[in-house]
């Protein structure tokens, strides 16, 4: 390895140099640590290079060219190169040759301080990844230069900027929106997702302004009604755009025309932002396009007008221009889902709040029908201020509390009006029943199965319609029947040797000590932080003082739910292996101290989904739990989506730094009523996405050898493992858990 301590010592000594001396040395374009009084000739340099690099030189590979190039460099550059060559070659001569071959090019394009940063970065890559990546880093001098240049203009979505943008959003009005990092600027109408970095423009000020423009555009989607529809019977955006023979083209056109409408709304509401938008727009305006979208500039235009224009442009030969710099993708699916769910919830909450406030004992439909609600503002799209409302009961005007005002404002933003609950959506008989093409049919036998009265009700995702089947699945939580306790004791005896090893490995995880980097105080210099600080200083920013590291002892804060497949397909060895692995896990986890729960799942059809409690998250490990593990036996089918949604709900009540949902299964989703194939996979995937959004990390352990065909789509490329031999399940699961929680 590279003499790391020496590099660290050099870096440490450089920190001790006064800023005055540092500036003086930098102005003279030489390294303050290595000053040579004489300039060496090519022959003198070649002699030193031959001696240092002898192990990697040959008749066809000489140091003549680097020596000739170094002879043209200054004495300070020569001294720098030869001194660092000595340090590098002590560990790896090949890396030394790569350094000396590329450092003349670095000298021609960078100051000595930048060259040093380039070098240390390459050495760190070598330390972590090996010779080839380290050599590549040395060869990519131009890439490093581009990184330096990019840092001069790049703006990152750090905590400070996030806080500024959140306050900015609060000032725009309407409902509160969260900000999180994402791959692209989008919103689901609840959260705004922004890229972690921007370097689109040539200055930090412009890129900071671009962040503000992106936030404004995404806020505008929620405020000016991009996802607004009158009621649940009105076709969604997705439905309307999918009617075209080429839905992809229709969606592109909609993105552009709706963006134009939103831009017009923003410019009317915020003249100052209009000037900033003009300053950031480097694309010449297309007069033809301006003429086409002119109808959308009217203050009273809505998303319906945008959809009408889509129809016109789709059947024309109009050229659709490129997106503007601040244009954001309209997340049609997630935006509509979140909006519909929020409308339904807000309608219920409003009816309940009004009933409590007026102290009226009546149904939600009655309370909303009896109260007259009028909005003072006729059109939210013409004013940036939140809408206000008047409320009257039996001719008496009332002033509702802030809670009710907020609910009415939220409903108005989503619907454009406040309706009675009876007209807010489809009736029970008219609700989407899932009988569209691609959905699982309800067999005659299944239709005869009565839904349990005390069951919990969950939606189910129909991927072909892009809809949730509302209140579709009925889940009942039961207690796992107890089995013979002898099974547990026999398992512990059977795996006695493996259990000792497991316990030892888990003990090492308890109260781990780790080194915290980027600290203001500590016992060692953090070389990575130092390099980052130097790069920032080169770009004109103030050099950070968080360049130290220190040891820190932290206790584990992990909660995990094991979701165990107890379908009929697990009969035999698989069921025994599941029970055995749970027994070993419990023994190991009791030593570790992590909070954990175990649930088995099975059922038959959407009307009889069953979840069996083996151990709840805060339930002590006891003889009862051991008996329940022994009592696990194969049952019916594998309807996974509803189970994941329910366990996500349970986990949402648990506070922990890391929350895991680990599935033990022998196959893909499957149920008697047709819940299989692509339909079952997509519903499970959607449920897992919902879990991830809730901050829960899902992982799957399976013995299905075909799982590699579908699990990457459901869980993600790295969030599953396939065990080749079912007999290895007990010991493998514990090892997987250990890796997941390190």
Image: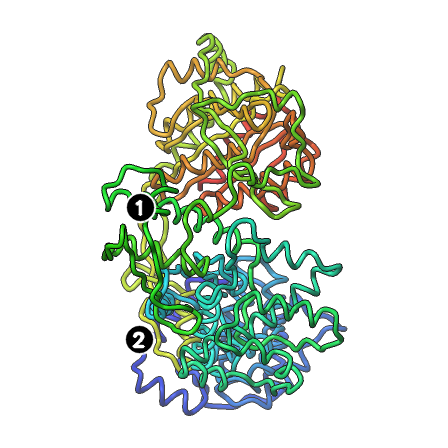
Is any part of residue 517 visible from this angle?
Answer: yes
Query: In what element is the residue under mark 2?
Result: helix
Circle on res. 508: none
Task: Indicate whether 255 appears above or below 570.
Answer: below
Instruction: Determine which residue is flagged by label 1.
Output: 553
Query: Residue 232 in the image: x percent, y percent?
Result: 53, 49
- Left or right, residue 411 beside residue 702: left
Query: In what element is the residue under mark 1?
Result: strand
**Are the residues tagged 1 and 2 within 8 Å (C-beta)?**
no
Res 157 quadrant in image? bottom left
Task: Indicate whether 431 appears above or below 389.
Answer: above
Q: Residue at x 34, y 41 (%)?
A: 655
| Near-viewer residue (526 or 445) | 445
| Near-viewer residue (229 or 155) | 229
Query: Residue 692 in the image: x percent, y percent?
Result: 49, 46
| Near-viewer residue (307 or 179) | 307
Q: How far apart are marks 1 and 2 (CA)?
A: 30 Å
Is any part of residue 48 visible from this angle?
Answer: no
Instruction: Determine which residue is flagged by label 2.
Output: 16
Res 509 quadrant in image? top left
């Amino acid at each position: 390895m590279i003499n790391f301590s020496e590099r660290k010592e050099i870096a440490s000594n450089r920190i001790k140099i006064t800023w005055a001396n540092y500036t003086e040395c930098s102005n003279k374009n030489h390294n303050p640590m290595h000053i040579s009084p004489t300039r060496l000739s090519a022959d003198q340099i070649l002699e030193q290079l031959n001696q240092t690099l002898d192990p990697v030189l040959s008749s066809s590979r000489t140091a003549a060219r680097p020596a000739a190039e170094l002879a043209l460099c200054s004495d300070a550059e020569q001294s720098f190169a030869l001194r660092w060559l000595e340090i590098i070659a002590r560990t790896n001569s090949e890396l030394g040759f790569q350094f000396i071959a590329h450092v003349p090019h670095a000298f021609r394009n960078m100051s000595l301080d930048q060259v040093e940063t380039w070098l240390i970065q390459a050495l760190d890559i070598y330390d972590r990844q090996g010779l080839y990546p380290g050599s590549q880093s040395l060869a990519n001098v131009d890439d490093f230069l581009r990184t330096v240049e990019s840092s001069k203009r790049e703006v990152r979505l750090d905590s400070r900027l996030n806080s500024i943008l959140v306050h900015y959003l609060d000032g725009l009005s309407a409902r509160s929106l969260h900000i999180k990092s994402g791959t692209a600027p989008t919103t689901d109408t609840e959260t705004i997702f922004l890229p972690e970095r921007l370097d689109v423009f040539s200055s930090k000020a412009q890129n900071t302004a671009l962040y503000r423009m992106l936030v404004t555009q995404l806020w505008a989607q929620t405020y000016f009604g991009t996802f607004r529809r009158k009621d649940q019977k009105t076709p969604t955006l997705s439905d309307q755009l999918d009617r075209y023979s080429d839905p992809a083209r229709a969606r592109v056109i909609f993105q552009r025309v709706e963006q134009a409408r939103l831009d017009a709304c923003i410019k009317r509401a915020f003249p100052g932002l209009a000037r900033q938008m003009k300053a950031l727009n480097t694309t010449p305006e297309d007069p033809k396009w301006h003429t086409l979208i002119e109808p959308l500039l009217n203050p009273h235009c809505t998303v319906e007008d945008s959809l009408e224009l889509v129809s016109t442009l789709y059947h024309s030969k109009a050229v659709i221009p490129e997106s503007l710099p601040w244009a954001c993708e309209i997340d049609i699916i997630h935006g509509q889902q979140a909006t519909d769910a929020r409308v339904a919830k807000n309608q219920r909450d409003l009816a309940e709040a009004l009933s409590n406030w007026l102290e009226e004992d009546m149904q939600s439909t009655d309370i909303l029908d009896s109260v007259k609600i009028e909005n003072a503002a006729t059109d939210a799209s013409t004013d940036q201020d939140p809408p206000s409302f008047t409320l009257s009961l039996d001719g008496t005007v009332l002033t509702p509390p802030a809670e009710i005002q907020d609910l009415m404002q939220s409903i108005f933003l989503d619907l454009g009006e406040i309706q009675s609950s009876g007209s807010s959506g489809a009736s029970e008989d008219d609700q989407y029943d899932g009988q569209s093409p691609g959905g699982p049919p309800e067999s005659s036998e299944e239709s005869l199965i009565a839904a349990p009265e005390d069951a919990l009700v969950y939606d189910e995702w129909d991927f072909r319609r892009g809809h949730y089947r509302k209140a579709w699945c009925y889940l009942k939580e039961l207690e796992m029947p107890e089995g013979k306790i002898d099974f547990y004791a026999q398992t512990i005896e059977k795996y006695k040797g493996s259990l000792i090893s497991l316990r030892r490995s888990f003990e090492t995880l308890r109260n781990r000590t780790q080194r915290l980097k980027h600290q203001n105080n500590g016992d060692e210099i953090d070389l990575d932080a130092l390099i980052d600080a130097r790069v920032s200083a080169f770009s004109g920013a103030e050099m950070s003082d968080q360049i130290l590291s220190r040891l820190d002892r932290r206790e584990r804060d992990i909660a995990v739910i094991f979701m165990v497949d107890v379908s009929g397909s697990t009969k035999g060895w698989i069921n025994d292996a599941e029970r055995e692995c749970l027994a070993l896990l419990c023994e190991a986890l009791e030593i570790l101290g992590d909070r954990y729960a175990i649930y088995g799942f099975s059922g038959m059809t959407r009307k009889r989904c069953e979840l069996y409690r083996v151990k709840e998250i805060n339930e002590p490990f006891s003889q009862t739990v051991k008996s329940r593990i022994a009592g696990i036996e194969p049952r019916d089918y594998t309807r996974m989506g509803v189970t994941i949604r329910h366990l996500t709900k349970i986990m949402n009540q648990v506070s922990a730094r890391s929350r895991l949902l680990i599935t033990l299964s022998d196959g893909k989703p499957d149920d008697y009523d047709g819940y299989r194939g692509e339909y079952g996979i997509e519903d499970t995937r959607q449920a897992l996405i919902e879990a991830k959004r809730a901050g829960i990390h899902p992982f799957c352990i399976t013995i299905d050898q075909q799982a590699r065909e579908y699990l990457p789509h459901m869980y993600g490329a790295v969030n599953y493992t396939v065990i080749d031999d079912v007999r290895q399940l007990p010991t493998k699961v514990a090892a997987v858990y250990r890796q997941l929680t390190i």
